Amino acid sequence: MSSISNYGRGYITKTLFGRSLNPNGTYFIAALKSSPNSASTGSTLNEPTAVSYARVAYANTSANWSASGSGSITNTNKIKFNVATQDWGLITHYALCDSFSGGNLFIFGTLTTKLFIANGDNLIIDSYGITISVNS
């Protein structure tokens, strides 16, 4: 299940109603150790602090996202993080941000499987591992 941040709600509204915003060409996927809330920003996320950790750039293209036509969209390609060179801890959530670090938070959600990422592990969010839904 996904949730939209306060920033994300404003961004969607402004984009849909001609307030001069364009969809991001790239999202930066963050791995999180706890759930953010709707007031969180890209700077307040609980991400791993290990040197090997970095958000993953994921292009906002039809090749990477598949719309179902029923108000949801899912990633069609794997999202591969760097190999951990030290423990990252338990990863429980993901976030879509507009920057490699800090920045704005658009959408966040719970990973289907919570994973402890240890030294030498490679976190991969499988194809169709993120589903974003817009409900009425």
Image (cartoon, helix red, strand yellow):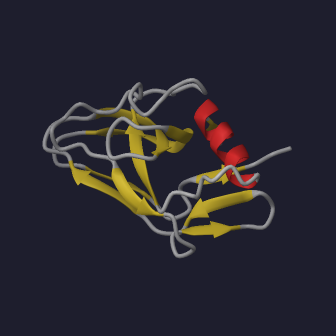
Seen in the picture, residue 4 relative to 17 is either above or below; the reply is above
* Residue 121: x %, y % from top left: 23, 49
The residue shown at (58%, 58%) is 22
Seen in the picture, residue 38 relative to 91 is either above or below; the reply is above
Seen in the picture, residue 42 relative to 100 is either above or below; the reply is above
State left or right for residue 99 relative to residue 75. left
Residue 2 is at least partly visible in this image: no
Out of 20 and 42, give the one closest to the viewer. Answer: 20
State left or right for residue 122 relative to residue 27. left
Residue 106 is at least partly visible in this image: yes
* Residue 69: x %, y % from top left: 78, 67
Out of 103 and 61, give the one closest to the viewer. Answer: 103
Please identify the quadrant where the N terminus is shown: top right
Q: Looking at the rendering, which quadrant does residue 73 occupy?
A: bottom right
The residue furthest right is 136
Out of 17 and 120, give the one closest to the viewer. Answer: 17
